Amino acid sequence: MGSEAAWGRMPFHFWSVTAFVVGCVTGSFLNVCIHRLPRGESIVSPPSHCPHCGRRIPWHLNLPLISWLALRGHCAWCRAPISPRYFVVELITGLAFLGVWLRFGAADPAAAAVWAVFLAGLIAATFIDVEHFIIPDRITLGGAAAGFLFSFFVPAVQGTSSSVEAMTRSLVGAAAGAGSLYLVLRGGKLLFGRKRLRFEAPLWILFGRRGLHLPEESAAYEDLLYRGNDRIRAPEAQVELEDRCLLRAEVRAGLKGKEVRELPSFPQGGSEASSASAGREEALFALRLRLEEGPLIWARCKELILPREVMGLGDVKFLAAIGAFTGWQGALFAIMASALIGSAAGLAAVALGRRQWSAQIPYGPYLAAAAALWIFAGPQIAARWLGM
Ligand SMILES: [Zn+2]
């Protein structure tokens, strides 16, 4: 074939440099997607403009990597700072394209191109998820459709030479990925569903009308409670009510469900003296939060257990896209490896003191990192896991 002869005539590393440059240009486009997709704006028009002063950015000031460095991260007109994210995304995409070229280019340039597109999608999803805690359908569902189509045209990415077989593997991969992550999401409260906060000394916590207040920080209930049956728990708390004080009570507070105030059966005259002398008074509170008249209670406790939603439906759709490109093996690898990467990152963040107790954690970046790992070394790592 003539075209293959033409490939061969240029030195291999001419194409390596080309891959890096094309990657940087693609990264520049991804920056537009990252900014506009979650805002529901068109990614083709209007042309690039400074979000601060609205001035249009001419092509010679919109060169990947170079322009950001030359302008030292500022708009040429109004000098408003431009996020380093623009530079970082261009660099990462350039390196990603270079990486797939070096890894797959010699054997199969078409497969290298498909993996480059896949990595570009992972990069866009990661940066959107970090900023907005969502992954747009155009990336997840669009990515699943793209994986299915690419499998038809380049069946080698599914490890076969038959287009029909490759499309079947793509469909099975999307279904296996979305299906198993959905099961993890539903059943996963056991694994990921709790965050336990232990305080060195008992703290007074206010269960307010709209949110939870600790001495140093506050969080709105809607940032802590995601599902109907989610509860904030204080297992052993001293509770101050309008009319009495309980020395040991378990507080369970949620947005829905019926309100229960199981008070102890022994004398409850409301006198604090008798409660104090009883000493072992126990009670269970199920509070409905955000009622009109509100429960507004103070609880003093050493421990607080928060529900934690690590994943959302966006991640399920994201894994359908990953599976459509990688097949079911890559999808399952992404679930397991992302859990490991996520735990390691979580521990590191806590150790560095970077994470606030109420911080929302996007899961998409861990899935993206695991999927990227799969392309470069996944089958080898999986073989080693299974061999153990
Ligand atoms: Zn400007």
Image (cartoon, rainbow, N blue to C red):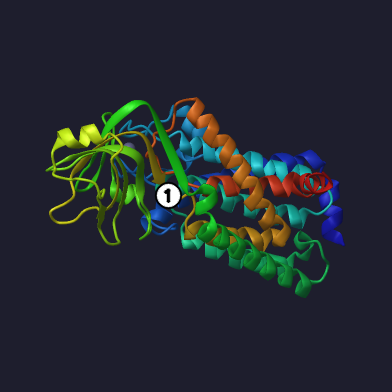
Name which residue lies at 14% across and 43% down.
Answer: 270
- Circle 1: residue type: Phe
* Crowd tier of the residue under label 1, counting other residues whose Cα lies within 10 Å: few below 14, some 14–19, many 20 or above: some
Name which residue lies at 47% across and 56% down.
Answer: 312
In the displayed image of the protein, which residue is found farthest to the front?
266
Q: Nearer the viewer, residue 213 or 27?
A: 213
Report whether the residue tagged 1 is closer than 8 Å to ligand 1.
no
Residue 357 drawn above or below residue 310: above
Q: Quadrant of residue 272?
A: top left
State which quarter of the image contains the C terminus.
top right
Q: Quadrant of residue 318?
A: bottom right
Question: Is 320 left, or right, of 231 in this rendering?
Answer: right
Q: Residue at label 1?
A: 133
Residue 77 drawn above or below residue 385: above
Residue 108 locus on image (x, y percent): 81, 54
What number of labels is visible? 1
Residue 300 locus on image (x, y percent): 27, 33
Residue 341 in view, yes or no = yes
Residue 280 locus on image (x, y percent): 31, 37
Q: Nearer the viewer, residue 48 or 254?
A: 254
Residue 65 in view, yes or no = no
Question: Is 337 left, or right, of 108 in this rendering?
Answer: left
Dividing the image into four equal quarters, which quarter contains ligand 1? top left
Q: Nearer the viewer, residue 210 or 108?
A: 210
State which quarter of the image contains the N terminus.
bottom right
Q: Nearer the viewer, residue 96 or 281?
A: 281
